[in-house]
Image (tube, rainbow, N blue to C red):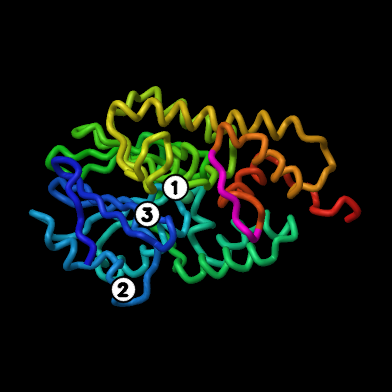
Amino acid sequence: MIELRQIGEQVWSRTVMLGGEAHVATYLVGGDGWALIDTGVKFPPGDPRSLSRSALARIPGFDDLDHIVLTHGHYDHVGGVAALAAEYPAAQIYLHPADRRMASSAIVQSEEMAAFAKAWNLPEKAASMEAHINERMTGVHPEYDLADGMRIDLGGGALIEVIALPGHTAGSVAFRLAAEDITFVGDAVQGWGSRTGSWPFYADPTSYRDSLKRLASYGPQRLAMAHGYHCGLPFNSAVLGASDVLAALELSVSVVDAIEREVLKGQPGRPALEMAREVVHALLDEIPARTEPTTGLPNHAGMALWAHGLRSSTTPHQ
Ligand SMILES: [Zn+2]
């Protein structure tokens, strides 16, 4: 069983390795009631990585799960909702409506995320992405909509404020727990990416950059991220303290700016995959890169560059 780790007065975290370097963090916040922020992926029944009643029961004062609040609709955040909701049927589930469609079905989501791989004639990459998402996600239909400025009061002084941070997905949000000055940002702050040598990714570079600046304007003291994003620190912690928050936000902005700059240098009409590899190469001094054999690109770079507009066909004659 994977234990929850206390990271604040009334805040616990749980980080699960998914294989390779991938890992995902979820957070539990307590007041009079309790809220879980993201659920992680779906695991087979009985898998020790599943978040179980017995793990939650070890938290002092925990009695029941009242809310499941989702930072966005990606499978590694919502994939475990269905299993957990079956264990806690009274829990209210919240998601921003802009991510409702992608959360509704693993097939919908995997098609969306693998779109670049299909368009760029990378069938092996597309097939592995689709298989992985289908294995790790059950679609969900949350009954409560999140909106910017909305508040979820857990009682006992634990008030969660919703901050809309579109960009990574259209419906990405952060949850700010003012009492402890911890802001749970999901995937809204990406730095260089979530794994060594991977890239950041987002559906819309412009709104992603605007959201980073908006988040900085709140002057957050602690960021609780959903993965150990690489932001210049020599470790994979998903929680950043005050001395690292501003640097992580500035780094994330500089990375998206650098990608955009290099994409704009490309000549229109050239094969997107070739241009993508050139952009990755041109940015080696600014974004650490380790390429995957199936694509010749760092993990997530295809999705990011697709979002930056590299969408032409892979062969100039098509
Ligand atoms: Zn995500």
- Is 5 situated left or right of 250 in this image? left
Q: Alpha-carbon neighbours of circle 2 within 10 Å: few (<14), some, or many (≥20)?
A: few
Query: Is 42 placed left or right of 46 in the picture?
Result: right
Question: Which amino acid does the dot numbered 2 rest on?
Answer: Asp
Q: Is residue 266 magenta?
A: no
- Kind of residue at badge 3: Val
Residue 40, above or below 98: below
Q: Position of residue 128 (x, y in %)?
A: 58, 67
x and y percent of residue 149 in the render? 36, 34
Residue 133 point in image, percent of width and height: 51, 65
Numbered mark located on residue 24 in the image: 3
Q: Which residues are magenta?
A: 288-294
State yes or no: Cβ of the residue under disc 2 lies below 8 Å from any atom of ligand 1: no
Q: Farthest residue toward the left?
A: 61
Q: Amino acid at mark 1?
A: His
Q: Quadrant of the N terminus?
A: bottom left
